[in-house]
Image (spheres, helix red, strand yellow):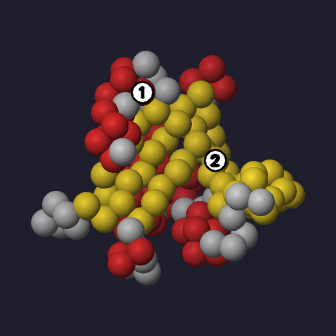
């Protein structure tokens, strides 16, 4: 399944739909993945990531997401990057806060997981806000 998923990445990039990067250790060992789905007609991207459980709490998601935001705003010239997380995963919320994303709202019972409906928190950052944070640094 992983190989089939990875095989979709070059086409998604060539079609301008998404870009996916591996998150690795300095030695090149896989720790997770991060993706940016693009909607160029709206100058918008949506960030998503996963980190393997043994590597949680090491700052990998924050570091990778910061690099992807730089790519989104400086290279792709997007205006907005958004992300969502489940309230049951507050660590993801903290990652987004560290990136400067602002919470924009809660979608109640947006997804079904098995027989349970899950709320989703939406967050986003705009290019000018990201640029201001990084020009000040």
Q: Nearer the viewer, residue 98 or 19?
A: 19
* Residue 50 appears left or right of 116: left
| SS class, disc 2 | strand
* Residue 66 appears left or right of 114: left
* Residue 110 appears left or right of 42: right
Examine the image and state in which quarter residue 52 appears.
bottom left
Q: Nearer the viewer, residue 57 or 5?
A: 5
Q: Residue 113, how many percent across, how many down?
A: 70, 57
Q: CA distance from mark 2 to mark 1?
A: 19 Å
Q: Earlier in the sequence, mark 2 or mark 1?
A: 1
Q: Residue 42, how many percent across, how many down?
A: 66, 26
**Badge number at residue 115:** none
Taking the spot 41% from the left edge, 65% from the top edge, the residue there is: 51
| SS class, disc 1 | helix
Q: Which quadrant, please, contains the C terminus?
A: bottom left
Taking the spot 36% from the left edge, 33% from the top edge, the residue there is: 9
Q: Residue 122, how many percent across, how many down?
A: 73, 55
Q: Crowding near pointer 1: few (<14 within 10 Å), some, many (20+)?
A: some
Q: Which residue in the rendered view is the most extreme toward the front? A: 115
Q: Nearer the viewer, residue 100 or 23?
A: 23
Q: Crowding near pointer 2: few (<14 within 10 Å), some, many (20+)?
A: many
Residue 136 seen in the current view: yes
Q: Nearer the viewer, mark 2 or mark 1?
A: 1
Q: Residue 7, how many percent across, how many down?
A: 31, 33
Residue 74 seen in the current view: no
- Vertical side of 59 occupied by 105: above or below: above
**Badge number at residue 12:** 1
Taking the spot 54% from the left edge, 48% from the top edge, the residue there is: 47
Q: Determine contact: label 2, label 1, CB under 8 Å.
A: no
* Residue 43 appears left or right of 50: right
**Badge number at residue 82:** 2
């Amino acid at each position: 399944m992983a190989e089939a998923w990875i095989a979709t990445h070059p086409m998604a990039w060539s079609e301008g739909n998404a870009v996916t990067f591996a998150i690795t250790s300095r030695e090149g060992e896989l720790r997770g993945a991060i993706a940016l789905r693009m909607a160029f007609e709206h100058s918008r991207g949506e960030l998503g990531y996963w980190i393997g459980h043994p590597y949680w709490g090491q700052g990998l998601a924050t570091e990778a997401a910061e690099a992807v935001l730089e790519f989104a705003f400086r290279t792709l010239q997007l205006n907005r990057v958004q992300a969502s997380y489940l309230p049951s995963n507050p660590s993801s919320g903290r990652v987004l806060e560290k990136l400067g994303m602002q919470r924009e709202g809660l979608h109640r019972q947006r997804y079904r997981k098995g027989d349970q409906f899950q709320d989703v928190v939406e967050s986003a950052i705009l290019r000018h806000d990201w640029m201001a944070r990084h020009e000040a640094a």
